[in-house]
Image: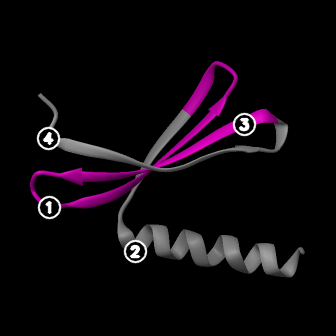
Amino acid sequence: MSDEKKTLIEEFTAPYNKKVKLEKISHESDMQMLRLHIREGRRFTIMDLDAPTAQKMGQLLLSWAQENS
């Protein structure tokens, strides 16, 4: 039995018909993670991020988007 609770945050389509899904993952040990799913046809990538990694990635993505808008 899994010790994690999944809560959907958002699903959307990215360029080239990639499907992106973000989930909040809560473990019984009170550890919180952000799960990133990227699906490209039959291929997919799943990545679990801790808060510092998600914050760093978010800052970099936002900075790039602001520079390229």
- Amino acid at dot 4: Asp
Q: Is residue 2 left or right of residue 41?
A: left
The span picked out in magenta is: 17-44
What residue is disc 1 on?
A: 30
Is 32 in the magenta? Answer: yes
- Amino acid at dot 3: Lys
Q: Residue at x 31, y 51 (%)?
A: 25
- Amino acid at dot 1: Asp
How far apart marks 1 and 4 lie (CA) works out to 10 Å
Query: Which secondary structure lies at badge 3?
Result: strand
Mark 2 or mark 1, which is nearer to you?
A: 1
Q: Where's the N terminus, which quadrant?
A: top left
Is 36 in the magenta? Answer: yes
What residue is disc 3 on?
A: 18
What residue is disc 2 on?
A: 52
Query: Which secondary structure lies at badge 4?
Result: loop
